[in-house]
Every structure is written in structure tokens, then in C-alpha cells.
Image (tube, rainbow, N blue to C red):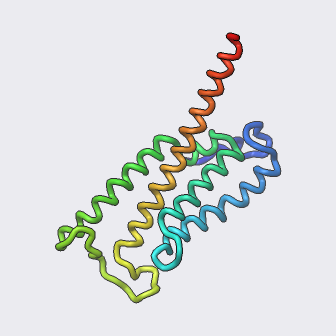
Amino acid sequence: MATKPELISSENPKGMTPVVKTVVRFAMGIVFMFGWYIIIYGHLTPGGGFAGGTILACGYVLLTLAFGKEVALAKMSDRAASIIDNSCAFLFVAVPLVGMAFGYFFLNFPPHGKPFDLVSAGVIPLYNILIGLKVTSSLFAIFLALSIFGRFVSKLVEEAEEEE
């Protein structure tokens, strides 16, 4: 889903200052590239699905803090986060079941390449991608839920103070 240009402009009153928005606009590409790098090369280097997913989720949180929730929800809505989260959990269980068709649960059934090549670890890169997407969507959904809950609680506190 494309973000409306007026939402990411520096003149948009929601979010932070134009300086922060400019820096975040520059940094977002780097954050997302690094997160995907960690996920995809997780079977060859330190990192993997959880670490890369956390980096990607931090990118969405940074986007939310700099531009406001409308921009972040235009990139990934809470419904999309829930669908991605549940789909990745299902696929994480489905892939071992496919391995079971070849003889064993969690069997590493794809052909293996040469060591230290990108396609050298069978299903492990697939698991990293699934976990990375699941962690990204889960952490972003948790951030959205906590921010909504925080707003709800602050309204209740304001109403209680007005009654006193």
C-alpha cells in the first residue's frame, strides 16, 4: 500500500520535527536493508530470524514515532501484521510436516549447496525468513497495542482527575 505524499512531508503536523523526519526518511532504507540482510544471511553469520525481525520491527516503530501512526499503518496495518504473524506460525509448522513426508519431522529435505554459499543450508534460511517476518509483525503489533492502551489509560486518568 502506497503512503500518501502529504503524510510523509515535513509540513505534516503529526510526528516529530522536520529534521527528525528527514533523518528517518534517510535511515529507513538502511534499517530495512540491514534487517533483511541479517535475516537472509542468518545461517551463515551471527544473527538470524529473531535478530533481523527485531531490527525490522524497530524500523516500523521509528517510522511511527517520526511520522505518526497513520504513516506506519499505511505501510503495515494491524490487520496485516496479524495475518503475517499467523501465516508465518502456520508455515513454521507446515515446513517440518513436509519434511515428515520424506521420512522425518524437521527433515532438512531441500538439496544442500556448498558450505558458506547463500543456498547451502536447506530449510534453515526458510525458517529464518519465517521467524523474521513473524517477529517483525508481532513486535509491531505489540507496539501498536501498547500505544493504543496507553492512550486509553491516559484518557481514563484525565476523566478521573476532572471528576475530582
Q: Nearer the viewer, residue 12 or 28?
A: 28
What residue lies at 39% left-to-right and 68% top-to-bottom? Answer: 126
x%, y% of residue 27? 70, 60
Q: Nearer the viewer, residue 156 or 112?
A: 156
| Left or right of 150 in this view: 96 | left
What residue lies at 48% left-to-right and 55% top-to-bottom? Answer: 135
| Left or right of 135 in this view: 105 | left
What residue lies at 33% left-to-right and 58% top-to-bottom? Answer: 91
| Left or right of 60 in this view: 13 | right
State whether residue 146 is above or below residue 23. above
What residue lies at 55% left-to-right and 70% top-to-bottom? Answer: 37
State whether residue 106 is above or below residue 114. above
State whether residue 129 is above or below residue 41. above
x%, y% of residue 96? 27, 65
Total numbered badges shown on the rendered structure: 0
x%, y% of residue 134? 44, 55
Name, please, the residue furthest toward the bottom: 114
